[in-house]
Amino acid sequence: MHSGQHYDRAMSDVFFEQLGVPAPDHTLGVGSASHGHQTGAMLGRLEDYLVEQKPDMVLVYGDTNTTLAGGLAAAKLDIPVVHVEAGLRSFNRAMPEEINRVVVDHISELLLCPTQVAADNLAAEGIRDGVHVVGDVMIDTARFFSEHAKPEEVLESYGVAHGDYFLATVHRASNTDDPKALASLIEGLAGVEAPVLWAVHPRTRARLAEFGLEGAIALAKNVRVLDPVPYIETVALLRSARALLTDSGGMQKEAYFFGVPCVTLREETEWVETVELGWNTLVGTDPRWIAAAAKATADEAARPARRPPVYGDGHAAERIASVIEEHFAS
């Protein structure tokens, strides 16, 4: 099932092609809309589909509007919900993703957590039944496909050398839909004392044009604006970057996995382990903090000596399959 929440070819089709994922049997085609309209459109279409298909369970992943719509549609039809990546909390209810996580966790029968911290979050909310710590499937994916990446070819195609550039991504609504925040981020990237490869999300690109900020980017001589980068190329660029500048949750984990320092363009994170272990710095959108944190990543001697495998060993998918099989067999 593909909801169509991500519909741009560079943000959808290319993943099926590169990762060898079979085409979905059914596509809802909801496209872009406000949170309420998008979730509502998915909810109605998913209910019709579930009534027709009569599945034994519905598995949802993460914290998107698709996750929420899938969980609600199933729960209202009394179909068991399995939530992969359960228990994450940023403790910022202004984030739409936080609302999605909390609601789906409280209607799920099986809650498959990437870390013990996530399981502890659920326990603090009174959720203990059906909770399993299985590891993070994004680490499975990063480990598997990193073997297929050809870093030398990718770096050559982008005209950069290992360790001489920063990789940047910005897509969260709190950063992209606020012209002041987006302008501050551009100023912060411009203050980084090295080339910055900025893979620009389609929505972010639209906001840059809407807010008249394209000129500010043009003045930032160290910033190269890129179209969305396919996953395998992203892995290659991330592994060779001096550091990652991002507001993405998933890329914070991938940077940790590959031993790349991360500067998170938010004031909180659901992946608290990356901060506690010294591989991630939260800076928000203040240009001075962004530039200072980026500069600090150059000091390799200051980096922690160890990166405990807090997100699993690359076999989360097998554990998830085993937990689901055992649960429903009983």
Image: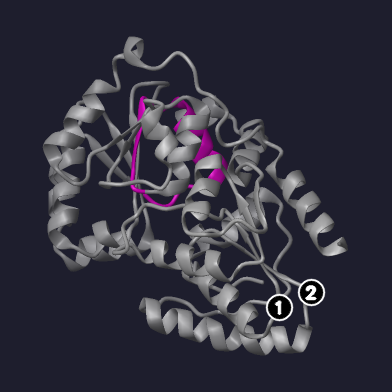
Residue pictured at 60% horizontal, 43% vertical: 136
- Please tell me which residue is depicted at 62% across the width and 71% down the height of the picture: 2
Residue at (62, 79) in percent of width and height: 75
Q: The residue under label 2 is which amino acid type?
A: Asp
Q: Is residue 229 magenta?
A: yes
Q: Position of residue 133 (x, y in %)?
A: 63, 45
Residue 153 on image: x %, y %: 54, 29
Q: Amino acid at mark 1?
A: Ile
Residue 220 visible at all = no
Q: Is residue 144 left or right of residue 69?
A: right
- Label for residue 224? none
Q: Quadrant of residue 144?
A: top right
Q: Is residue 50 above or below residue 11?
A: below
The N terminus lies in quadrant: bottom right
Element at badge 1?
A: loop
Which numbered tag is attached to residue 56? 2
Q: Quadrant of residue 260?
A: top left
Indicate whether residue 165 is drawn in magenta: no
Q: Name the element at disc 2.
A: loop
Considering the image in quadrants, where does the C terminus appear? Answer: bottom right
Q: Residue 245: x percent and y percent? A: 32, 38
From this viewpoint, which residue is outermost toward the top? Answer: 301
Q: Disc 2 vs disc 1: Cβ atoms closer than 8 Å?
A: yes
When the figure is inspected, residue 256 is found, relative to residue 176, above or below; the finding is above
Q: Residues within 10 Å of mark 2 (few under 14, many from 20)?
A: few
Q: Earlier in the sequence, mark 2 or mark 1?
A: 2
Query: Magenta segment, which residues?
Result: 226-247
The colour scheme used to paint the residues is: one colour
Depth order, front residue of 112/177: 112
The residue at which mark 1 appears reads as: 79
Q: Relative to 116, does residue 214 appear above or below in the rendering?
A: below
Give the distance between the C-alpha atoms of the residues marked 2 and 1, in whole angstroms: 7 Å
